[in-house]
Amino acid sequence: MNYLAIDTSGKNLTILICKDGVSHWYFDSECGVNHSVNLMPKLERLCLEHDFDLKKADFFSAVVGAGSFTGIRIGVSTVKALCFAFNKPCLSITSFDTLAYNINSGKVLAVIDAKHNGFYVCGYENGKVIYSPNYILKDQLLELATGYTVVSLDDIQGLSVKKVDILKGLEIAIKENLDKVTTDIESLNPLYVRKSQAEEGR
């Protein structure tokens, strides 16, 4: 199996290529707001280092959110462009998937800090979504978290949080969702759980 996956939904930049079933990574935990500058040069370098031919990929995948509005758009538009250029199918993976798929059983609540006392959340049970992606405030999160294993990249005061590996989570999420690979490129869309600050201010 050969594929390329990109995650620009947060402050990190993740590029994964899988060549003949073997995974190779580029990961920058502090890319910040420089995704548009760094993504293509790092992608090209990773492909060169591992002799990965994009024309031979089985599909391209993007992490579609929730997360940074600008970052998500960069990742999704890049993968869409690659799909059109090379006539390949696509796969959407959520930021919640990259967290939750680190835990292989039970009820898992994937939590992303949206700042200003807000959080993006999604609940899973045995790998299936049971609580749809939502934006909630801290007091709602504390109430909702009861009965879940909470997974996040951040410490959350008042909660016991299991820190997880989003690289491992992305790889597992792709393997578990291969049945969702589609030739409908227009279905690859950003997952915006709430409006941007600019939209909310209108």
Image: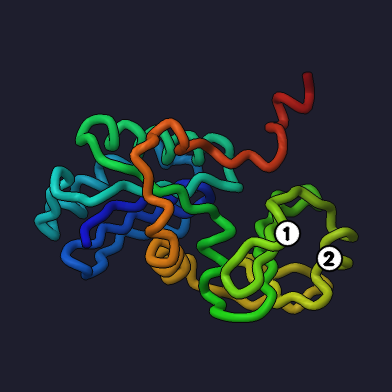
Which image quadrant is residue 29 in? bottom left
Question: Which of these two is toward me, 134 or 45?
Answer: 134
Dot 2 alpha-carbon crowd within 10 angstroms: few under 14, some 14 to 19, many 20 or more: some
Question: Mark 1: which secondary structure?
Answer: strand
Identify the residue at the far front of this view: 179
Question: Mark 2: which secondary structure?
Answer: helix
Which quarter of the image is occupied by the N terminus? bottom left
- Residue pictured at 28% horizontal, 52% vertical: 4
Residue 144 position in % (x across, y down): 83, 65
Question: Which of these two is toward me, 48 or 30?
Answer: 48
| Above-or-below relation of 39 to 95 | above
Mark 1–mark 2 contact, CB under 8 Å?
A: yes
Please say whether residue 37 is visible from this viewpoint. no
Q: What residue did someone put label 2 on?
A: 144
Residue 131, disc? 1
Residue 16 position in % (x across, y down): 31, 58
- Residue pictured at 78% horizontal, 24% vertical: 201
| Above-or-below relation of 29 to 53 | below
Residue 114 as seen in the image, left or right of residue 86: right
